[in-house]
Image (cartoon, helix red, strand yellow):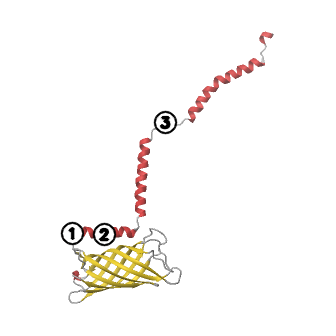
């Protein structure tokens, strides 16, 4: 009977051996299940990253440029493109001199300046389109930010201006539009409005009339707006109603 009795110790050891023999196989199978398939997406990944970065860069550049800056740039490019390219054709003698006065609710501004006519004209509709460069030096006076006293600002601006005259250019009446760049020093701050930058855009619309034997005199009513186009806040902007007198020098 001893030879046929089954010892519990022998039974447990055999069970442990059988478990050990099966354990590596199961572990390998689980490892294979957890292991992800090997792929080589490097080319596609770099291509997608490049496409995303280029598209995001172009969209960010287009969104970061304010509209008045783009319009001013287009106006300057058009002025340069329409002007003669030869240095010999450039005339530094000014075409006219002007003086103007304008105001807002609590700020008054006076300015003087010179203009240089472009050397080309174009037919546009029933009239004639021309233009000129303008350089202006002005002085603003408003109520100080504290509410007492006055705040003074010096303005220097350069503006390309388009002018249109009806009747093929023979009419004494004219209409103008321009967008230029201006420096306001120090930063314009009054009791009512506070700018945040020295650099500002100035865009205007005007209607005027020439008079005199040689049309050497001009009067124009203008509306001009100054702001930094959202480059930095605060940016409340300021709009002036202006009256300008121009004397033609040549």
Q: Are marks 2 and 3 in contact (CB under 8 Å)?
A: no
Q: Quadrant of residue 60?
A: bottom left
**Relative depth, front residue between 47 and 2:** 47
Give the quadrant of the N terminus: top right
User: What's the distance in space between the residues labelled 1 and 3, CA to CA?
Assistant: 65 Å
* Mark 2, residue position: 76
Farthest residue, direction left: 88
Q: Comparing marks 1 and 3, which lies closer to the viewer?
A: 1
Give the vertical position of 97 relative to 55 (above or below): below
**Relative depth, front residue between 100 and 219:** 100
User: What's the distance in space between the residues labelled 2 and 3, CA to CA?
Assistant: 57 Å
Q: Which residue is drawn at 23% across and 89% down?
A: 212
Residue 243 at x, y percent in the picture: 35, 86
Q: In which quarter of the image is residue 94?
A: bottom left
The answer to which of marks 1 and 3 sits earlier in the sequence is 3
Give the vertical position of 101 relative to 60 (above or below): below
Does residue 217 appear left or right of residue 144 in this picture? left
User: What's the distance in space between the residues labelled 1 and 2, CA to CA?
Assistant: 14 Å
Mark 2: give few (<14), some (14-19) or many (20+) Cα within 10 Å. some
Does residue 126 appear left or right of residue 106 in this picture? left
Q: Residue at x 35, y 75 (%)?
A: 157
Give the vertical position of 250 relative to 61 (above or below): below
* Mark 1, residue position: 84
Secondary structure of the residue carrying tag 3 is: loop
Residue 246 at x, y percent in the picture: 29, 84
Secondary structure of the residue carrying tag 2 is: helix
* Mark 3, residue position: 38
Does residue 26 appear left or right of residue 166 in this picture? right
Mark 3: give few (<14), some (14-19) or many (20+) Cα within 10 Å. few
Q: Residue at x 44, y 45 (%)?
A: 45
Give the quadrant of the C terminus: bottom left
């Amino acid at each position: 009977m001893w030879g046929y009795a089954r010892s519990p110790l022998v039974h447990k050891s055999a069970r442990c051996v059988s478990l050990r023999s099966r354990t590596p196989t199961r572990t390998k199978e689980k490892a294979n299940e957890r292991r992800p398939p090997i792929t080589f997406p490097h080319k596609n990944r770099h291509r997608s990253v490049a496409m995303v970065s280029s598209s995001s860069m172009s969209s960010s550049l287009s969104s970061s440029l304010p509209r008045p800056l783009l319009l001013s740039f287009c106006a300057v490019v058009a002025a340069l493109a329409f002007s003669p390219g030869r240095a010999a054709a450039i005339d530094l003698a000014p075409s006219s001199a002007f003086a103007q006065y304008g105001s807002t609710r609590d700020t008054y501004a006076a300015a003087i300046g010179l203009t240089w006519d472009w050397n080309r004209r174009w037919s546009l509709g029933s009239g004639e389109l021309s233009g000129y460069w303008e350089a202006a030096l002005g002085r603003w006076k408003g109520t100080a930010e504290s509410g007492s006293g006055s705040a003074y600002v010096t303005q220097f601006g350069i503006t390309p201006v388009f002018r249109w005259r009806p009747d093929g250019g023979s009419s004494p009446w004219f209409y103008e539009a321009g967008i230029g760049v201006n420096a306001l020093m120090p930063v314009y701050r009054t009791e009512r409005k506070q700018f945040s930058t020295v650099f500002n855009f100035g865009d205007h619309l005007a209607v005027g009339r020439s008079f005199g034997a040689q049309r050497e005199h001009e009067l124009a009513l203008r509306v001009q707006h100054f702001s930094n186009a959202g480059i930095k806040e605060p940016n409340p902007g300021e709009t002036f109603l202006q009256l300008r007198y121009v004397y033609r020098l040549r």
